[in-house]
Image (cartoon, rainbow, N blue to C red):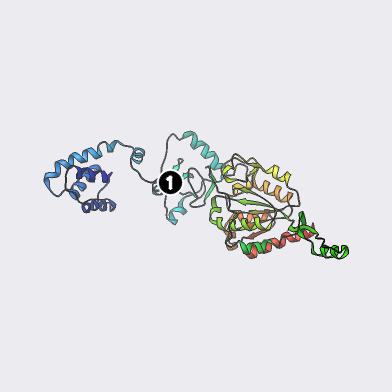
Amino acid sequence: MFLNLFLELRSVRVSVSIREYLSLLDCLDKNVIPFKVEDFYFLARTSLIKNEKYIDRFDQVFSKVFQGIEKLTFEEILDKVDIPKEWINKLSEKLLTSKEMEEIKSLGGFDKLMETLKKRLSEQEKRHQGGSKWIGTAGTSPFGAYGYNPEGIRIGQNESRHKKAIKVWDKREFKDLDDKSELGSRAMKIALKRLRQLARTGINEEIDLESTIHSTAKNGFLDVKTQPEKNNAVKVLLFLDVGGSMDSYIMKVEELFSASRSVFKNLEYFYFHNCLYEGVWKNNRRRWNEQIPTFEVLNTYGKEYKCIFVGDASMSPYEILFPGGANEHFNKIAGKDWLFKAISQWESHMWINPVPKKYWDYTQTIKMVSDIFSGKMVPLTLSGLDKGMKQLILSLIHI
């Protein structure tokens, strides 16, 4: 917009230099004037016009460039000016000091929040920004985006900022994990190989040296005997938490996933988000269209499978404890009930947590999930994997 003013003045032969134009932008950047058209007019004229004979031409150009600007709404201005959307989003974020955050009180629990949200939705008529009541942006309301509230429902925000929302009312897209990640996965493979039960299965591809020698000596001619290759016969079910707070650990989990695909020949994996609910999926891009019912998974894979969950277990307690507490959809059965069904079906189970163990006590839901798994939660470290594999080996011996 300001560049248009500069170019139009040059087109009508007003001698305006780039230095003068940059001086005008510098004044605007330092908020020399209030945001009024009249004040901007005098600032622009003072910065750009050196000779009184050009004032009439300046007035004509200024009127042409900025005609009707006072009547434009904020949305219309954004449509006309090419400002990156992410800049606008950042400007709209609510930034508070730690003292200001402490003064904001929560509404009082999941049920109260859902009841109030329903009431707000029926009453609200238009977009709202700022404030502490309506569904909007950059405020202290429990509902909306880019604001702050100690316990609220996030609506219309790309990613987590304060990790305070008890429910996220948005559809989000996740990426599949890369099973070709080799960096750091070598040491993980060594730890995972503790969990093995070698068996010869499949077609005869490997030379059986002992049988070959015996048969050759007996028959008097070379008689090559083959046998199936020895493979790890352990069957593993891997449930992987994706999206949200797990984005911080994506590289470590990809290394673990890559190592698991290499070590376990009988591996099945499924994705979930935050907590196990009525559906899991194999492809994150099709997680809504090709969701697999959890009941189907429970009935398909027998008790011989070793069940491993990988996730940070960091979420709202409501997502575990209550029906309807899940993000993105309404779950009829509480998350904890699904977890109990899983560990009941697969008695050999554990949870791998990428969050460093020294921080576990700071998150309530990590302790809740650990209790559900009877303490069978290990950190995503070499020592943690080593300990976890030993626990699963003991279950193999008992079986």
Please give left or right for residue 185 compared with residue 196 in the image. left
Question: Which residue is farthest left?
Answer: 53
Label 1 neighbourhood size at 10 Å, few (<14), some (14-19), many (20+)? many
Question: What is the three-letter code of the residue carrying label 1?
Answer: Gly
Q: Position of residue 283 (x, y in %)?
A: 60, 45
In this rendering, the count of numbered labels is: 1
Residue toward you, 5 or 200: 200
SS at mark 1 in the image: loop
Q: Is residue 334 visible?
A: yes
Residue 205 placement: quadrant:
bottom right
Q: Is residue 269 above or below residue 213?
A: above
Return the residue nearer the eye: 85 or 215. Answer: 215
Q: List x then y, in percent, for residue 209.
A: 79, 64
Residue at the spot 62% in from the left edge and 63% down from the top edge: 186
Does 142 sit left or right of 35 as displayed? right
Point out the residue furthest to the front here: 221
Does any portion of residue 381 appear in the rendered image? no
x then y, percent, for residue 318: 59, 47
User: For this rendering, which residue is in front, 224 or 113?
Assistant: 224
Residue 5, by quadrant, is top left
Mark 1 lies on residue: 139
Q: Is residue 360 left or right of residue 209?
A: left
Image coords of residue 187 (percent x, y): 63, 64
